[in-house]
Image: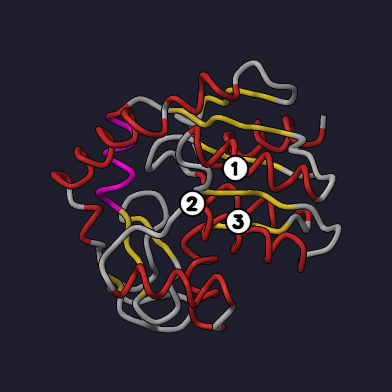
Amino acid sequence: MNLVLFGPPGVGKGTQGEKLSTETGIQHLAMGDILRAAVREGTDAGKQAKVFMDGGRLVPDAVVIAMIEDVIIAGGETGFLLDGFPRNVAQAEALAEMLSRHDLNIDRIVFMDAPEENLLKRLCGRLICRACGFGFHRQYSPPRKAGCCDRCGGELYQREDDREEVIAQRLVIYSEQTKPLLAYYQDKPGFYKLDASGEMQSVYAALKQVVVN
């Protein structure tokens, strides 16, 4: 099973993607993780990406696609769930072309959506562990000890881009660049629109129903 999971910042793509991956064995491919791993491991695409990142520039789509291609091929037949990619129509078209070269298809395309007030509440409450990167939420999934990661004991912090004024700008960028993906994907086979405004478990149950049917 190969999936694309997309939607606005704070809608829960990462949380739901990780849970689905753990339960089904589908490879969870979060774009930020792929980028950091490729640079750390010194792959050809990672070396190219590092040049752009060190210069404060965006990594070109061709390099990003090459990194995704490396990970998908290395993963064999476990299937994949793309989280955070594609971000725009040009990337979606490049992804489709790359998958076609390997005789691969996207089986499910799930658009997760929620009202803006829900997104702001979720994003403003997020906390990340500096040591292991595990995420918490002040309201929905707080750590057992304030400021301390349950997994490794590391310090928890709020990312700069999770401040309310930054979040508002992220949502504007999403509307301009990523939301057109809805028009691109909505008529394709396997497309589903999922209401992600409810509790995490109910949203996950709905997502799982989409994937298994």
| Up/down of 49 relative to 120, above or below | below
Residue in the picture at 56% in, 83% down: 41
- Residue wearing tag 2: 61
Q: Position of residue 147 (x, y in %)?
A: 28, 73
Residue 108 falls left or right of residue 46: right
Q: Quadrant of residue 57?
A: bottom left
Q: Earlier in the sequence, mark 2 or mark 3?
A: 3
- Residue wearing tag 3: 18
Q: Crowdedness of circle 3 by 10 Å Cα count: few (<14), some, many (20+)?
A: some
Residue in the picture at 46% in, 83% down: 152
- Residue wearing tag 1: 94
What is the residue that sits farthest to the left in this orientation?
165
Residue in the picture at 77% in, 35% down: 107
C-alpha separation, residue under disc 1 versus residue under disc 3: 25 Å
Q: Say which amino acid is labelled 1.
A: Ala
Q: Nearer the viewer, mark 2 or mark 3?
A: 2
- For the residue pair 146 and 91, the one nearer the viewer reads as 91
Q: Are marks 2 and 1 in contact (CB under 8 Å)?
A: yes
| Up/down of 47 relative to 189, above or below | below
Residue 129 falls left or right of residue 117: right
Q: Secondary structure at mark 1?
A: helix
| Up/down of 97 relative to 210, above or below | below
